[in-house]
Image (tube, helix red, strand yellow):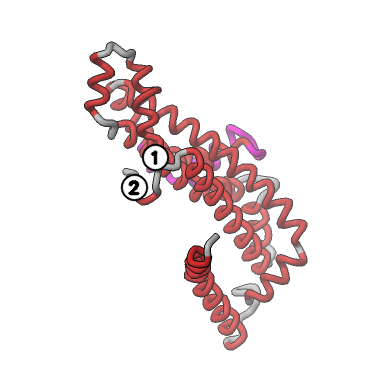
Amino acid sequence: MRLGEAGRWIVTRLQWVLPLLVLVALWEAAVRLFDIAPYILPAPSRVAARLYEDAGLLFHHGLITALEIVLGLAVGVGAGVGTAMLMAMTRLAERLAWPLVVATQALPVFAIAPLLVLWFGFGLGSKIVMAALIIFFPVVSATHDGLTRTDQGLIDIARLSQAPRLRVLWLLRLPAALPAMASGIRIAAAIAPIGAVVGEWVGASAGLGYLMLHANARLQTDLVFAALVILALIAILVRSIAGYLTRRMIPWAEERDIHVI
């Protein structure tokens, strides 16, 4: 890395690290100045101490939540891309599928979470389905948008060559839709943790959502904040990995060029 690039990298990181440090410092000062009870708002130093003391506990529950997020992301992306490709095949499939796709986004996750726990149990299954369900719409929307934006001239040439519709979809439209699909995957990676944690709140025997729920009931607010820190780190890590993989696999796809409806 050249000196100029290193300088830009440092400046970029400082742009979000410094505001965060200022916020933490103000938080610590406010708690001490106004003598706020720890069960209402613990100081950052107290949260840091809890992170150290309960590192093993947080790691155990964090690992379970991370597994739910990754598996839910894989299932949701697979289902979303498959649905978008099916919708791109025929107008009839698109008209039939769109209302169902929109319904998955319109339904409140808390309303269907108890049903998923009832159907799939208290284990990983219900949390994976919840995470997959919450990312389903952005993946379908982005991928379908990319498929419909394929150059019509290329499609006409393929049809004049009597290429089968499925072959046109697989070899022409899908590669053209990869940048949009990558955008949908990056968005999905950022919001998948919501589905996993909501599922844990409704019914689970492990996970960060489960840990936060029980810590809150015991007024262990510092443990709740510690779990939130771990959850945020997991979300950032998953999003970063998804961004890295999509950039490596689709290097011509720039995030700012992607449109998601």
Could you tell me which secondary element the residue under label 1 belongs to? helix
At 26% from the left edge and 23% from the top edge, which residue is drawn? Answer: 155
Q: Is residue 113 magenta?
A: yes
Give the secondary structure at mark 2.
helix
Residue 57, image x, y percentages: 75, 56
Q: Residue at x 34, y 27 (%)?
A: 173
Quadrant that contains the C terminus: top left
Q: Is residue 198 left or right of residue 51?
A: left
Judge from the rendering whether residue 206 lies leftward or rightward of residue 146; answer left or right.
right
Q: Name the residue rendered at 51%, 38% in the picture.
A: 132
Prevailing secondary structure class for the magenta stretch in the rendered image: helix
Name the residue that disc number 1 marks: 179
Specify start and end residues of the magenta stretch as a single range: 102-124
Q: As rendered, which of 60 and 17 lies closer to the eye?
A: 17
Name, please, the residue furthest toward the bottom.
Answer: 33
Question: Do tag 2 and tag 1 residues touch (Cβ < 8 Å)?
Answer: yes
**Residue 113 place in picture, x, y as percent:** 53, 42
Identify which amino acid the numbered label 1 is placed on: Pro
Q: Would you say residue 258 sits in the magenta stretch?
A: no
Considering only vertical position in the picture, is 83 above or below 253? above
Mark sitting earlier along the chain (2/1): 1
Q: Residues within 10 Å of mark 1 (few under 14, many from 20)?
A: many
Q: Given the image, on which type of amino acid does mark 2 rest?
A: Asp
Instruction: Check the image and report above or below for 57 versus 63.
Output: below
Q: Is residue 88 above or below residue 15?
A: above
Residue for badge 2: 257
In the image, residue 204 lies at what x, y percent? Answer: 66, 45
Instruction: Tell me if mark 2 has few (under 14), some (14-19) or many (20+) residues whose alpha carbon lies within 10 angstroms of its own.
Output: few
Q: Position of residue 36 (x, y in %)?
A: 60, 81
Using the rendered image of the protein, determine whether residue 117 is visible from the camera's viewpoint: no
